[in-house]
Amino acid sequence: MVGRYGSRARFQEDDPSGSVDGARKVVESTVELTVFLTDIAALRGYGRIRAELIPGPAPASSAVQVGALAQPGMMVEVEAIAVL
């Protein structure tokens, strides 16, 4: 996952629009995550990236392997519930 999946799962640090700052606030308030993977073997790598992006105790989480995601080429989709 680090590499192929990892580059798609990390925030862009140089985002000039400020959307990353807003996204970080949501990430810090996340209480539940559901990750959809096209290859469940990537779950361990996803977990390492999640730990990097959401330090501290992990929110409640579920993982589901799917045959495909909404757009061709997508490999990971994360649904998050946050309390703001």
Image (cartoon, grey):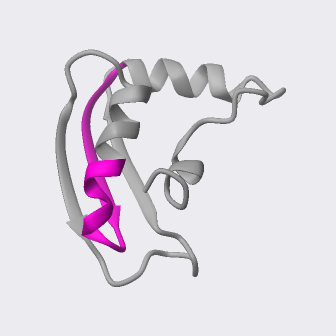
Residue drawn where x is 39% and y is 51% of the image = 78
Indicate the quadrant containing the C terminus: top left, top right, bottom left or bottom right: top left
Residue drawn where x is 26% and y is 15% of the image = 56
Asked whether 79 or 38 is in front, the reply is 38
Residue drawn where x is 22% and y is 65% of the image = 64
The segment highlighted magenta reads: 29-45
In the image, residue 38 sits, relative to residue 21, either above or below, namely below
Residue 52 lies, in percent from the top left, at 41, 27
Give the quarter of the image for residue 16.
Answer: top right
In the image, residue 59 sits, relative to residue 69, either above or below, namely above
Work out which residue is located at the far right of the displayed protein and give it. 16
Residue 43 lies, in percent from the top left, at 27, 56
Residue 72 lies, in percent from the top left, at 58, 81
Is residue 42 shown in magenta? Answer: yes
Is residue 4 shown in magenta? Answer: no
Residue drawn where x is 33% and y is 29% of the image = 51
Give the quarter of the image for residue 33.
Answer: top left
Query: How many numbered marks does the figure carry?
Result: 0
Indicate the quadrant containing the N terminus: top left, top right, bottom left or bottom right: bottom left
In the image, residue 18 sits, relative to residue 42, either above or below, namely above
Residue 54 lies, in percent from the top left, at 37, 24
Work out which residue is located at the far front of the displayed protein and give it. 3
Asked whether 84 or 72 is in front, the reply is 72
In the image, residue 12 sits, relative to residue 75, either above or below, namely above
* Residue 78 as seen in the image, left or right of residue 11: left
